[in-house]
Image (spheres, rainbow, N blue to C red):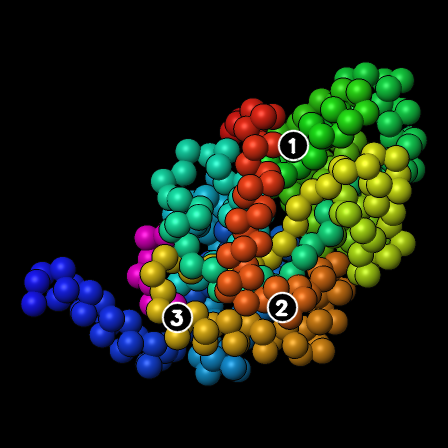
Amino acid sequence: MTKGMAAIAFLLCWGTAVAQGFPSRPVTLISPFPPGGSTDTTARIMADAMKGPLGQTVVVENVGGANGSIALARVARAAPDGYTIDIGQWDTHVGAIIYPISFDLQRDFTPIGLMSINPQLLIARKDFPARDLKELVAYARANPGRVTFVEQTAAAKLAGIQMMQATGTTVEFIPFRGAGPAMTAMIGGQVDLMLLQAAAALPQARAGNVKVIANLSPKRSPVVPGVPTADEGGIPGLYAAGWFALFGPRGMPKEVVAKLNAAMTAALAEPRIQARFAELGLEVAPREQQTPEALAAFQKAEIEKWWPVIKAANIKVQ
């Protein structure tokens, strides 16, 4: 037997042994952002719901920094045994190319399953003069360069650039290191506009601290049915992507991926989890999109759609 054949045989035997005993200890679910945000909240909901089907505790670990790319580097380097996975989203598994990353977003991760589609809401400070997109565009045209737009993620800046290009307006981007500090600034009246997931925007909107301008999705969301889309507001095609999914390191045994996916889908099928997601403004992904294969195709389509736009807009780390 050649050395190459021996190595392949070893890896096959190792993978089978890992899969048969998985999980025999707690699984670490890395959340790529600080505690308190929508990513962290969703991670903790899923960690609690998946421990029953897995028969092991799922521990959430927050690893923030560089728009999630520090966390992803750790996952990419982890052993592909299923004990280290991450909750990913557009910013980490598509938009991370704006950073000098040391891993390949398409080759260095194993898709486990798509959990949710997340409406992205364009919100404004509560005393902002405009109540909807049409009024916003009119105000921005009358006040060129005076409207401030929070730049806390690549997705946010991309949406702001697309809005300017579609309407012939100009906004001033204000960089922030996260949605939390940006929301504090907005509540304090220091910034005008911000794009973020409904899960993070709805609590402040319900409290009357901010106003919702539009849902930047192709269609209205059942979790925020009263919020009009950008198409309805007069800016057709102004969309921002949002979703949550589970990924692991490259090379995970199929049996391990299947066990993690089964625990995820079992959790998402629970009425209490569906109700909790709806409360947060998250849409549970359709069952057919929850498979590893469907997530791989979904991420590939997102990359092919957004990477050319990001490069054309020349979005870089500030």
Q: Does residue 51 show up magenta in the picture? A: no
Dot 2 corresponds to which residue?
A: 288
Q: Quadrant of residue 170?
A: top right
Dot 1 corresponds to which residue?
A: 157
Q: Which mark is first along the chain, 1 or 3?
A: 1
- SS for callout 2: helix
- SS for callout 3: helix
Q: Position of residue 27 (x, y in %)?
A: 42, 70
Q: Position of residue 110 (x, y in %)?
A: 42, 59
Q: Quadrant of residue 252?
A: bottom left
- Report the residue at 69% width, 27% height from top: 161
Give the spatial CA distance, label 2 vs label 3.
18 Å
Give the spatial CA distance, label 3 vs label 1.
37 Å
> Looking at the rendering, in which quadrant would you find the N terminus?
bottom left
Residue type at mark 1: give it: Lys
* Figure check: 305 above or below 197: above
Residue type at mark 2: give it: Glu
- Report the residue at 14% width, 64% height from top: 5
Tag 3 and tag 1, C-beta contact below 8 Å: no
Provide the residue span drawn in magenta: 74-83
